[in-house]
Image (cartoon, helix red, strand yellow):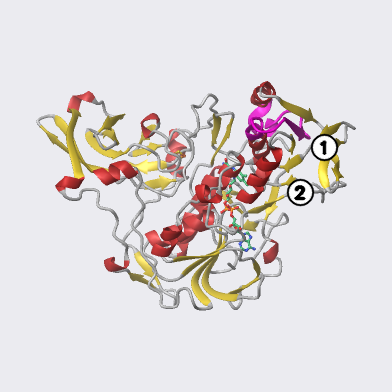
C-alpha cells in the first residue's frame, strides 16, 4: 500500500431550475457546527474536547503591523442586500450590507476562485455564481458545497457614518480559511490494526467525512483508503483539463493530512467487509478493525463489450493517469469519443485543440437530450460542429480494429469505419460495490447501497455516501435516488460524519452540477429531469 487552475471563462449558457423560495429554505444544507464540539472515543461515547487538541487557526486580526485598516465607504453608499468588492491595498474584501449591518468577507470563492460579488445574497448567505457553494455572511463559514474551505471574516466598524474595515494582510492574500479542526491524539495512530473510523474511498465523500469529523472535534484515529496512488484530488477536472498533473489536482497537500492526523492508505483495495467482527480485509491480506465505517467507493466506468475491446489505446477516464495518457496519444492524431454525455463531450471539447480529428459516437439523436431537452442539445451539438467535431449519432460501436495491437479503426453498427488512434469511452458507470456482495450490507438490484437520510446503511455503525448510494430525496416524496454529483458527494460525506458523532443530521441540499466546454459553462440546479426516480448512471449526472 503504499493547484492551481485557469478559471472558467465567462458563462454564456446558463440553465438553472431554481426552487421556489419556500422550498429552498427547507432544502438547503446548514453546515454550521451545532452545540459544543465533541470528540468521539473508541467506546462510542462522546466527550468534550479540549482546546489544546485543536490546531491554531491563523488569526484574522493579528498585530497592527500585520493588519491594514481603511475607511472604505459611507454607510449610505450601499443599500440593504447589496454587495461590493473593495480594495484594501493588500487585497480585496467583499463588503455586504444586510438588514442595516455591514459584513466584510473574502471576495473569492475558495473552490475555483469565482468573484462572489456576482453571486446571490439571500437569507444571510452569499451563494457562489459558478457552482453554488454557500457562505454564511456572519461567520464566513462554508454552509453548502462544493469546496472545502470557508471565507475569512474581517472586522467592520462604523464611525461618523463611515465604514471601516480592518483585515490581516495574510488573510487578504490567502482568500480562504480552513475551519478550525481537532488533531489526532490517538496513541495507536499509524501503527495498529484497528482504527476508530475507517473510510473506504478517498473521493469527495470520504474526504469531507474525514474533515467534518475533525471540524467537529473528533480526535481519534481516522483512516481513509483509496485505489489511487494519489491523495484525494479534484475528479471533475479530469475531463475538463486532461493535461493536469496529479499535484495540480490535489484537494489538500500532504502536510494537511499529517497536521490533522488523517491517515491515507493509497493503492489499498478493500476486498471484503466483515460487519460482524467490524473488520475489513485488503487485497494484500492486511486486516483493519474499525468502530465506525463509511463506504464511499464511488463508481467504476462501464467499458465497451464489442469485438476488439482489449486493443491498446482505448480508455475510460477515472484517474489523472488515464486523462494524461489520452492527451499524449491524441496529439496531432485521430480521437474517437464513445458517448455524448457530460464526460464524453467535455473530453471531445478538450481534444479539439490537440487532436487532428475528433469524432463522437452516440446512440441518441442529440447529445444531452434526456437531460437538457432537444433544443439545448441541438444548440450544443452545433457549437461542437463549429469546432470541427464530427458526430455519428444513433449508432454504436461494433468493433475496435487494431494494427500491431494498437487501435486503428472504430467500426460502427451503421457500417461506417472511423479512423482512430485513441478512443475514450464515456458510456456510464456502475457503483463500485462488488466487494460488499458477500457482506450483510444491503445492495439494491443495480448494486447501489441504499441509505436513509442520515446516510446509515442497514448495518448499525456502517454509513455510506456519494456516487455509490441511493438516498431518499425530500422533493421526490422521499423516493430513493442516486445523484452522482461532486457537490452531492460532499454534502453526504458531511452528514455521515455528523451522524457518526450522533448529531442526527439529515441530508438536505439542492442537487447541483456543472460542466465546461470551449470556455463556456453550463450549470444545473434542482432535481434531475425525467423523474430521478431510480439510480442514475454517470452520464445522467
Ligand atoms: C471524469 C469525471 C468528470 C466529472 N465531472 C463532474 C462535474 O463536472 N460535475 C459534477 O458534479 N460531477 C462530476 N463528476 C462526478 C463526480 O466526480 C462524482 O460525483 C464524485 O467524485 C463522487 O464522489 P465519491 O466520493 O462518491 O466517489 P469518488 O470520487 O469516485 O471516489 C471513490 C473513491 O473510492 C475508492 N475506492 C473504490 N473502491 C474501493 C475499494 N474497494 N477499496 C478502497 N478504495 C476504493 C476510489 O479509489 C476513490 O478514492 C465527474 C466524474 C468523472 C469521473
Ligand atoms: S467557484 Fe464557487 S462553487 Fe465553484
Image point 29% across, 56% down: which residue? 57
In the picture shown, does residue 267 fall above or below 113? below
65 is higher (above) or lower (below) than 159: below
Q: Residue 126 versus residue 256: which sits nearer the camera?
A: 256
The total of numbered circles placed on residues is 2
Q: Residues within 10 Å of mark 1 (few under 14, many from 20)?
A: many
Name the element at disc 2. loop
Direction from residue 149 to residue 531 in the image, left or right: right
Give the vertical position of 289 relative to 252 (above or below): below
Extreme-left residue of the structure: 160
Query: Where is residue 150 drawn, in percent x and y?
Result: 37, 47
Whether residue 319 is visible, yes or no, is no
457 left or right, relative to 254:
right
Residue 122 magenta-highlighted: no
Residue 118 position in % (x across, y down) = 39, 29
Residue at the disc numbered 2? 303
Quickly name the residue at label 1: 396
Identify the magenta region.
349-374
Q: How would you rate the neighbour count of disc 2 (Cα within 10 Å): few for under 14, some for 14-19, many for 20 or more?
A: some
Q: Which mark is residue 323?
A: none
Amino acid at each position: 500500500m503504499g493547484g492551481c487552475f485557469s478559471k472558467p471563462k465567462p458563462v454564456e449558457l446558463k440553465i438553472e431550475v431554481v426552487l421556489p423560495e419556500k422550498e429552498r429554505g427547507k432544502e438547503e444544507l446548514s453546515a454550521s457546527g451545532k452545540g459544543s464540539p465533541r470528540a468521539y472515543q473508541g467506546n462510542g461515547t462522546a466527550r468534550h474536547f479540549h482546546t489544546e487538541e485543536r490546531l491554531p487557526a491563523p488569526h484574522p486580526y493579528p498585530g497592527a503591523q500585520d493588519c491594514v485598516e481603511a475607511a472604505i465607504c459611507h454607510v449610505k453608499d450601499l443599500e440593504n442586500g447589496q454587495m461590493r468588492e473593495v480594495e484594501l491595498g493588500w487585497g480585496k474584501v467583499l463588503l455586504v450590507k444586510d438588514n442595516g449591518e455591514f459584513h466584510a468577507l473574502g471576495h473569492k470563492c475558495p473552490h475555483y476562485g469565482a468573484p462572489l460579488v456576482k453571486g446571490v445574497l439571500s437569507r444571510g448567505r452569499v451563494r457562489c455564481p459558478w457552482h453554488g457553494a454557500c457562505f454564511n455572511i456572519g461567520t464566513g463559514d462554508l454552509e453548502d458545497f462544493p469546496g472545502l474551505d470557508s471565507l475569512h471574516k474581517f472586522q467592520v466598524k462604523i464611525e461618523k457614518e463611515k465604514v471601516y474595515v480592518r483585515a490581516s494582510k495574510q488573510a487578504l492574500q490567502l482568500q480562504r480559511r480552513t475551519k478550525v479542526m481537532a488533531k489526532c491524539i490517538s496513541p495507536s495512530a499509524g501503527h495498529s490494526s484497528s482504527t476508530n473510523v475507517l473510510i473506504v474511498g478517498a473521493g469527495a465523500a470520504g474526504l469531507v467525512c474525514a474533515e467534518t469529523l475533525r471540524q467537529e472535534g473528533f480526535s481519534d484515529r481516522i483512516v481513509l483508503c483509496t485505489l489511487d496512488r494519489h491523495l484525494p484530488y479534484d475528479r471533475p477536472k479530469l475531463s475538463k483539463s486532461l493535461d493536469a498533473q496529479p499535484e495540480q489536482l490535489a484537494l489538500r497537500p500532504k502536510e494537511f493530512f499529517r497536521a490533522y492526523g488523517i491517515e491515507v492508505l493509497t493503492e489499498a483495495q478493500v476486498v471484503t467487509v466483515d460487519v460482524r467482527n467490524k473488520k475489513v480485509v485488503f487485497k494484500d491480506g492486511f486486516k483493519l478493525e474499525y468502530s465506525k465505517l463509511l463506504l464511499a467507493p464511488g463508481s467504476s466506468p462501464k467499458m465497451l463489450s464489442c469485438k476488439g475491446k482489449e486493443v491498446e489505446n482505448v480508455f475510460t477516464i477515472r484517474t489523472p493517469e488515464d486523462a494524461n495518457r489520452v492527451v499524449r496519444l491524441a496529439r496531432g492524431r485521430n480521437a474517437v469519443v464513445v458517448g455524448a454525455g457530460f464526460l464524453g463531450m467535455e473530453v471531445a471539447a478538450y481534444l479539439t485543440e490537440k487532436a487532428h480529428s475528433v469524432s463522437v459516437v452516440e446512440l441518441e439523436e442529440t447529445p444531452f437530450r434526456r437531460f437538457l431537452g432537444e433544443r439545448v442539445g441541438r444548440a450544443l451539438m452545433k457549437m461542437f460542429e463549429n469546432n470541427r467535431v464530427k458526430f455519428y449519432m444513433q449508432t454504436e460501436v461494433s468493433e475496435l480494429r487494431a494494427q500491431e495491437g494498437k487501435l486503428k479503426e472504430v467500426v460502427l453498427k451503421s457500417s461506417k469505419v472511423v479512423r482512430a488512434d485513441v478512443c475514450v469511452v464515456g458510456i456510464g458507470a456502475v457503483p463500485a460495490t462488488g466487494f460488499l456482495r458477500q457482506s450483510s450490507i444491503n445492495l439494491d438490484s443495480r448494486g447501489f447501497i441504499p441509505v436513509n437520510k442520515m446516510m446509515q446503511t442497514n448495518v448499525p455503525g456502517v454509513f455510506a455516501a456519494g456516487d455509490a448510494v441511493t438516498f431518499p430525496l425530500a422533493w421526490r416524496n422521499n423516493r430513493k435516488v442516486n445523484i452522482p454529483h461532486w457537490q452531492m458527494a460532499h454534502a453526504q460525506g458531511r452528514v455521515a460524519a455528523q451522524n457518526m458523532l450522533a448529531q442526527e443530521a439529515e441530508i438536505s441540499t439542492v442537487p447541483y452540477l456543472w460542466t465546461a466546454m470551449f470556455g463556456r459553462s453550463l450549470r444545473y440546479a434542482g432535481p434531475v429531469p425525467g423523474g430521478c426516480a431510480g439510480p442514475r448512471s454517470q452520464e445522467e449526472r
